Image (cartoon, rainbow, N blue to C red):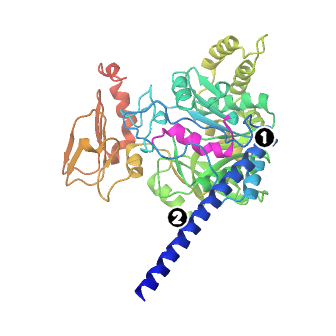
């Protein structure tokens, strides 16, 4: 009897193993088919120059690495989920056929100093210990929605080489280098002015290089809805569901539903609200009619330039002059780099320094030209060490460590974050919610509660004679 039972169990295990193998083969075949469908759609629309049945390349993981980067086993190219149907995949790429992703990559490196610096702002660092910097993570997130040919980065000239190194598949002509910081209106406006000359019907989506997003499918769905809404000539923003009464973000008040095909959740923006105090933020959260303003905008390039011309005419004119030179070809058919450099140098310094929210989003909202797609994905701008601490894996009520945890010893400590980059021991006893960033040339000690004030401290540090030794 026992032998019969044993034989039956062995037979059952064998059958289960065979079924698992068949399922694995089916999943692999399905994934291959979906990749083929995706590439066929892209080639049919003329958006890619890839060889048949290939997946567009994405950045190599052999990028310049910060001292706390670790190897990653995550794939660096997008492979559709086995649960995604070929029909839905084809529908998605049809909706995005002239969509361009624009990544503004700027920053002074002050909110996470001394971890980030002017020469190496946070978007070039791996702050999530995945083996990918923030800008590489942004590239990975956007690639399923577009191709390397339609992915553009706007960054400072001092960071251009580092961006190109971390994103080797970024086309040189899609890397727009600013001579000096000019805020988001000039950065995104320059991308729009260039795109109008390449494709008059191009729709651009602007997504910051240094934000964290969780929930890939929810993000993709929100972008697709935003693109569908932008086709109706709206300036579209993506609103983030508040997780608490935050005072560090601007808010968007939701208006009526627009009833746009392909965008069932799109609403009119009733009003943009500046960063509120705690009481006001709590009221926003309780009402359910507000979303965080994450600075994500989707709009036709032509419409953005029209709005800039209406509200900031001198800025629009300067950007159009630069864009004309940017796309200029020399007699041999190559990009005229000398003319581009000269015009950029002559015009850029005189452009107005203003955020895109103030330049066009707020005044356009008053005229009913701004829409919002309420989103459900997780989002964080990694604006201070407190938010960074929340995102790092750790035991309950324990310190978070960004880097090699063998350099950190703590006893009776709750919360806080340590970044040990100087390769020396950091020991903590009986101190809660501290922020300790130990680098070879600078040491920061503060509390999580005061970490949002770091910008003021950095400004004071710059007055010190020791500052030049830390940059």
Give the answer, above or below, for where 430 lies relative to 419. below
Q: Nearer the viewer, residue 128 or 310?
A: 128
In the image, is residue 142 part of the stretch drawn in magenta?
Answer: yes
326 lies left or right of 69: right
360 lies left or right of 247: right
Q: Which residues are magenta?
A: 131-148
Residue in view at x 68 percent, y 26 percent: 315
Q: From the image, which quarter does the C terminus lie in?
A: top left
Q: From the image, which quarter does the N terminus lie in?
A: bottom left
Q: Nearer the viewer, residue 159 or 76?
A: 76
Q: Does residue 75 appear in this view?
A: yes
The answer to which image quadrant residue 178 occupies is top right
Looking at the magenta stretch, what is its main secondary structure? Answer: helix
Residue in view at x 63 percent, y 42 percent: 143
Give the answer, above or below, for where 53 lies relative to 155. below
Give the answer, above or below, for where 106 lies relative to 327. below
Indicate which disc residue 43 carries.
1
> Which residue is labeled 2 in the image?
286
Residue in view at x 48 percent, y 75 percent: 10
Can you give x and y, in whole percent of width and height, for residue 164 in the image? 56, 27
**Disc number lying in front (2 or 1):** 1
């Amino acid at each position: 009897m026992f032998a019969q039972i044993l034989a039956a169990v062995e037979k059952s295990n064998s059958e289960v193993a065979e079924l698992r193998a068949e399922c694995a083969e089916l999943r692999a075949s399905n994934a291959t088919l979906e990749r083929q469908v995706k590439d066929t759609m892209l080639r049919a629309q003329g958006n890619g120059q890839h060889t048949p049945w290939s997946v567009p390349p994405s950045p190599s993981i052999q990028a310049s690495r910060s001292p706390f980067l670790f190897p990653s086993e995550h794939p660096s190219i997008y492979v559709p989920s086995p649960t995604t149907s070929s029909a839905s995949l084809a529908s998605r790429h049809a909706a995005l056929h002239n969509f361009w992703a624009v990544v503004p990559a700027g920053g002074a490196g002050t909110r996470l100093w001394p971890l980030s610096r002017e020469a190496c702002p946070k978007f070039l660092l791996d702050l999530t210990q995945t083996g990918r910097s923030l800008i590489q993570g942004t590239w990975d997130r956007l690639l399923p929605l577009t191709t390397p040919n339609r992915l553009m980065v706007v960054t400072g000239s001092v960071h251009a080489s580092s961006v190109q190194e971390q994103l080797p598949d970024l086309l040189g002509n899609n890397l727009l280098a600013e001579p000096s910081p000019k805020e988001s209106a000039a950065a995104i406006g320059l991308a729009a002015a260039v795109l109008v000359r390449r494709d008059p019907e191009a729709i651009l989506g602007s997504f910051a290089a240094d934000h964290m997003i969780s929930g890939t499918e929810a993000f993709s769905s929100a972008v697709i809805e935003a693109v569908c809404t932008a086709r109706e000539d709206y300036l579209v923003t993506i609103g983030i569901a508040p997780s608490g009464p935050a005072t560090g973000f601007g808010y968007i008040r939701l208006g009526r539903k627009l009833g746009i095909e392909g965008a069932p959740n799109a609403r009119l923006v009733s009003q943009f609200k500046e960063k509120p105090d705690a009481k006001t933020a709590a009221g926003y959260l309780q009402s359910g009619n507000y979303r965080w303003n994450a600075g994500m905008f989707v709009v036709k390039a032509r419409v953005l330039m029209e709005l800039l011309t209406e509200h900031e005419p001198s800025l629009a004119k300067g950007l159009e002059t630069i864009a004309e030179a940017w796309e200029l070809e020399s007699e041999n058919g190559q990009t005229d780099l000398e003319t581009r450099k000269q015009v950029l140098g002559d015009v850029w310094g005189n452009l107005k320094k203003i955020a895109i929210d103030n330049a066009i989003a707020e005044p356009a909202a008053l005229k009913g030209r701004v829409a919002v797609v309420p989103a459900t994905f997780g989002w964080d701008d990694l604006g201070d060490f407190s938010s960074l601490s929340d995102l790092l894996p750790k035991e309950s009520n324990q310190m978070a460590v960004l880097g090699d945890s063998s350099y950190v010893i703590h006893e009776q400590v709750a919360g806080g974050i340590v970044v040990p980059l100087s390769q020396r021991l950091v020991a903590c006893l009986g101190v809660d919610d501290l922020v300790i960033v130990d680098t070879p040339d600078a040491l920061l000690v503060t509390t999580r509660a005061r970490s949002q004030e770091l910008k003021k401290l950095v400004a004071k540090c710059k007055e010190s004679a020791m500052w030049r030794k830390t940059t």
